[in-house]
Every structure is written in structure tokens, then in C-alpha cells.
Image (cartoon, rainbow, N blue to C red):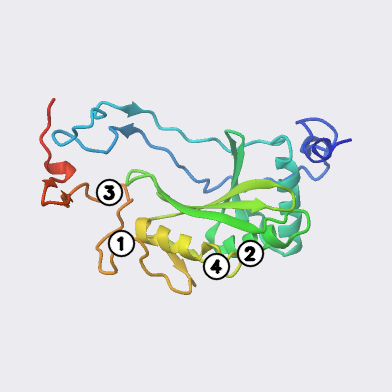
Amino acid sequence: MSKDEITQPAPGTPGSSAERPSGGLEPASSGAPAAGRERRGMFGVHGSGDTSGYGGLRLPAYVPPAAERPYGGWFDEVADALLAALGEKGLPADAVQQVTVDRGEITFYVRRDHLVEVCRTLRDDPALRYELCSSVSGVDYGPETAQRLHSVYHLTSMTYRRRIRVEVVVDVEDPHIPSVVEVYPTADFQERETWDMFGIVYDGHPALTRILMPDDWDGHPQRKDYPLGGIPVEYKGGAEIPPPDQRRAYS
């Protein structure tokens, strides 16, 4: 029997969550994160100023639903191992708010108060071994979305050659999330960039300063309500292109 046959049972087959008496990981249903909004136009420009030709773009809101057991493949194995490890540490069952399986990837939505311990568990537990945090990034779903700011962590198990996503959601009025640098040192500059671009404050970070914008920059450029334009594009020789909100419209 190959390694894939051992670690990746199909849904409903022996070894999958459907055959396990524990029932598998059942995250709390209350406070489940919402993350979807309709998109209008490529750059959010209304009226004049959008010369890209994408002003008529319309994309409906899409929210991946919470997954139901069995998740399929090795996803069930990881979920069960995480549940058992969190239980051994005495962490509450609602430390994981929701599990989503979408486009062949699994995401664990984690409450921010338990983020560091969940990450430490994912790193250290012998059945998990997610030793590498390969990316920390931010998402802003816009002012019309509750808990609009998301901090996204991509974790890789070098031992088992698996990847998962951990996600934390916060309100823009209280954008504080514990830093995971003590668990994953690779998150150092990545948390700085997410703070710089999205304004998510990583409490406990060793040096949370701007990394892309000047230290005295006002605002966070990748937030959806950040004003578009205002700064012209300058070229060598003195030529300038006005900012997008001041450009001439041709339609």
C-alpha cells in the first residue's frame, strides 16, 4: 500500500472521518466569518477617471460555505489531529470558528485569542508538523463587510508535504491580532508588510514599523476605502501622468 493510500482516504472509506467514532472536528457555528462582496469596476472608480475599460465589470459576491465532514483526503486526518491536540492543551472547542474546503484547499478560521497556541500546536504536534509559515498576508473586504480585515497564514508541513491556510478576522475598529513571530520567525517582515498595507496591528511583534511606505505615511494603501490617486506618476525627463482620479475619461 502506498503512502497516499494510507494518508489520503476518500470520503466515506475506512480511515476517513465518517468511520471515526469521535465525529471529527466540529467548529463553533456562531460568529462564523463572512468574506464576500460584489465587485464593481476593476479599480473602484465611479464616473470619470477610469480609462482602463474595466468600469463596467460586475462580479457577484462569493462566500465559500463552511465545510461539512467528511472533508475528504488527508483534510480529515489533519482536522482530527488538530482537534485532539487542542483538547490535550485545554483550549476551547470554539478556538476554531469554521473550516472551509474550497478549490482543493482547506482553511481553518481561528479566533485571535488562541492564534499563537493553535500555531504552536500545528508546528509541534507529531501528527501535524507544520514547521514553515511561508506567507502572512492581509485582505480587506471593504466597509460594507463585517469583520472586513483578514490576516491569512499559509503553513507548510515539510514532514508530510501538506499545506493549509489559517485565517483570522477582525473589525477595522479593533484590528489587533497577536504576532506569531515567536512561533514562526519567517512572519517577521510579512507581518510588517501586512501592517503597512492593511493596518492590522500585530501585538507583540518585535519591531512593527512600515516596510514599504515611508515612516510618516498617512493610511494603509491596500484598504478598500483608501483614496485612489492623488499622486502623479513621474517619469525621467520631467514627464508626468496625473493620478487616476484626475485622468481624462474617453467614454
Disc 2 is placed on an element classified as: helix
Q: Is residue 199 above or below residue 147?
A: below
Q: Is disc 1 in contact with disc 2, using a CB cutoff of under 8 Å?
A: no
Q: Is residue 147 visible?
A: no
In percent of the image, x 31 and y 57: which residue is there?
220
The picture places residue 133, in percent across and down from the top left corner, at 59, 57
Judge depth for marks 4 and 1 and give the one in front: 1
Disc 1 is placed on an element classified as: loop
In percent of the image, x 26 and y 51: which residue is there?
226
Which disc number belongs to residue 225? 3
Number of numbered discs = 4
Which disc number belongs to residue 181? 4
Question: What is the crowding at mark 3: few (fewer than 14 residues within 10 Å), some, or many (at least 20)?
Answer: few
Q: Amino acid at mark 3?
A: Asp
Q: Could you tell which of marks 1 and 2 lies nearer the N-terminus?
A: 2
Which disc number belongs to residue 64? none
Q: Is disc 4 in contact with disc 2, using a CB cutoff of under 8 Å?
A: no
Q: Residue furthest bottom?
A: 206
The picture places residue 24, in percent across and down from the top left corner, at 74, 44
What whole-number distance in Å separates the C-alpha atoms at marks 3 and 4?
A: 29 Å
Residue linked to disc 2:
117
Q: Could you tell which of marks 3 and 2 lies nearer the N-terminus?
A: 2
Judge depth for marks 3 and 4 and give the one in front: 4
Q: Can you say which quadrant of the picture contains the C terminus?
A: top left
